[in-house]
Amino acid sequence: MCGIIAYIGTKQAYPILIKGLQRLEYRGYDSAGVALLNGDLNIYKKKGKVKDLLDFAENKNLGATSGIGHTRWATHGKPDDNNAHPHVSGNGRLTIVHNGIIENYALIKEALKNEGHVFHTQTDTEVLVHLIEEVQNQDDLPIEEAVREALTRVVGAYAIVVMDKNDPDKLVAARKGSPLVIGLSDDGFFFASDGTPIVEHTKKVIYLDDEHTAVVNRNGDYEIRTIDNEIHTPFIDELTMEIARMEKGGYDYFMLKEIHEQPRTICDAMRGRLNAKEGWIRLGGVDDFGDNVRLAERFIIVGCGTSWHAGLIGEYLFEDLARIPVEVEYASEFRYRNPVIRPKDVVIAISQSGETADTYAALELAKKQGAFIYGIVNSVGSSISRMTDAGSYIHAGPEIGVASTKAFTGQVTLLTLMAIKIAKERGQITTEYYQRLLQEFDRIPQKVEKVLKSNDLIKYIASEIKDSPNALYLGRGYNFPVALEGALKLKEISYIHAEGYPAAEMKHGPIALIDENMPVVVIATNKSLNEKIVSNIMEVKARKGIVIAIVSEGDEEINKIADYTIPIPETEEPFSPLLSVVPLQLLSYHIAVMRGCNVDQPRNLAKSVTVE
Ligand code: G6P
């Protein structure tokens, strides 16, 4: 949800900003822009992708050793050149890039108009930079003080970087609700929405906290203060990301690369945590806070999008194996619903980015009400990971494709480890079953590898159904959330309308949609519910629907009735989502490519949703 990059130092800023914007493009790609300061202030901004900005800026005056850049996911004001960031103050002295929403911008705008300010865009960000200008002018303040003072008048979320033409050796930044990382190097300072644009320049970073401001100086000095003007001594962290994991590595799209990385990322999520031979699972978060987690009376899982789907699988796992009652909540609903949270509830947040605004706010609420907060997060050092009481990183590496794939299987891997471990510790499963689960779970990465070998078959099926305007996804038990996830994958990247349903619910509505043009993807791997799902397939076939069935290897019965079958290896039922979701990821990928869609950057979506 908007990406920010800024640099001040001894190197040329433009190449750093452009490369940084390319890394951050997953956060929004409606428009991109840079402001470069070198005596003069040069601003170049363009509707569209970073590539469009690059073409536009070619042969322009790009020399500067400080600058700020932005890639936008539009909220206030349509995506066009004019509304693109950076925005400028009325006197042309200040420029700003902003990620977030200034909720009281309309009121501020009215007040500023009365003072004679003229606005040229529909954005809330332009209002903010005019407000900073107004505050600066009133008391002739240095830029860092004007920013701090202006922010005390603002309601909403922001990560900002501000550049002052009259104070060219400084950059000023602040955050509340939206992420911002500061990179410290011998060649200068960097600001970015996450570590991905910084890591190739320096590993030393500071994660700016909420309601903190930072001023960095070309001479190497920096200072962090709270909005209330208290000096803060920051903790200097180390970035651990690998640059290779942020490149496409020979694949056409990041999404395809990330789908194929899953055998390894699932292994990475298990590494040091599962030892099937010795029969143990170790999870720091659970081991260190055993009583909070083990003695929980209820788990409340919160998340959004694909992470919410992982949470639904968590519900099946925790209830089935550990016998802990579970509620799974959309974070956006939970936070506004006045939910009942009890002292022995554990709230589990699931988030790839660790920055989703609704999930963050849901946790703040739960924390205020005294719940213990556990995070299952991918992005190390992110806001959500820092506010939890305990947690486990999934270690999937940067996920760049907007449609989540390897983060989903990483989240499910962690939930599965937790469920088996807690089930054992609460005495809910026998030692024999526990050992069997461990042995089988250890084999999951190899089995995912095997599923990936069906790529050609899946591509062929994709070619057969790619022109359908609609699709239905059906699953039962553990595979019902997989049906939801399969439908989400298809709609977000190929723009085909798709819905996921519990297979048995089909007859309460969606069955009315089935005719000879409707592809129905049925996940039919559950042994315990096999007969029921066969009946559901018969119901679809009786209405001439096109059945694509994901089946366990050797399932001859479904093979005979379905139009297409994709066999996947057998496994213990609680682990089946980790295998059955993979063909659905590939199916949506191939359909989207065949329809000419931009798989990694689907329209209107963003990877990290830092607005409500
Ligand atoms: C966006 C992304 C999804 C993601 C969801 C939740 O909608 O496009 O892929 O599942 O946000 O994000 P999170 O980072 O909290 O998992």
Image: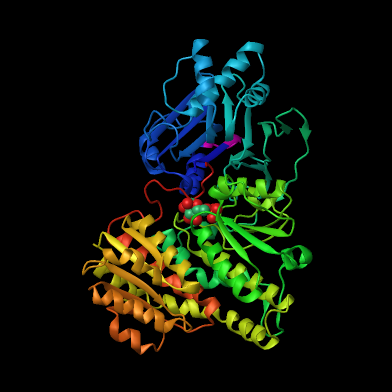
- Name the one closer to the observer, 562 or 327: 327
* Marker count (numbered): 0
On screen, residue 337 versus residue 519, left or right, reads right
- Asked if residue 458 lies in the magenta stretch, the reply is no
The span picked out in magenta is: 7-13
Residue 250 visible, this orientation: no
Q: How is the image coloured?
A: rainbow
Residue 99: x %, y % from top left: 53, 37
**Coordinates of residue 143 in the picture (x, y in percent):** 64, 22
Q: Which residue lies at the image location 63% right of the left edge and 67% below the top edge?
A: 325
Residue occupying the point 78% across, 38% down: 233
Is residue 298 depicted above or below 224 in this figure? below
Q: At which x and y percent is residue 562?
A: 29, 80
Please say whether residue 140 is visible from this viewpoint: yes
Would you place residue 289 above or below residue 456 in this image? above
Give residue 189's quadrant in the image: top right
Query: Which is more toward the observer, 9 or 561?
Result: 561
Taking the image as shown, residue 601 lies to the left or right of residue 377, namely left
Q: Position of residue 134 (x, y in %)?
A: 58, 15
Please name the residue shown 70% across and 34% down the image.
Answer: 220
Does residue 525 sit above or below 137 in this rendering?
below
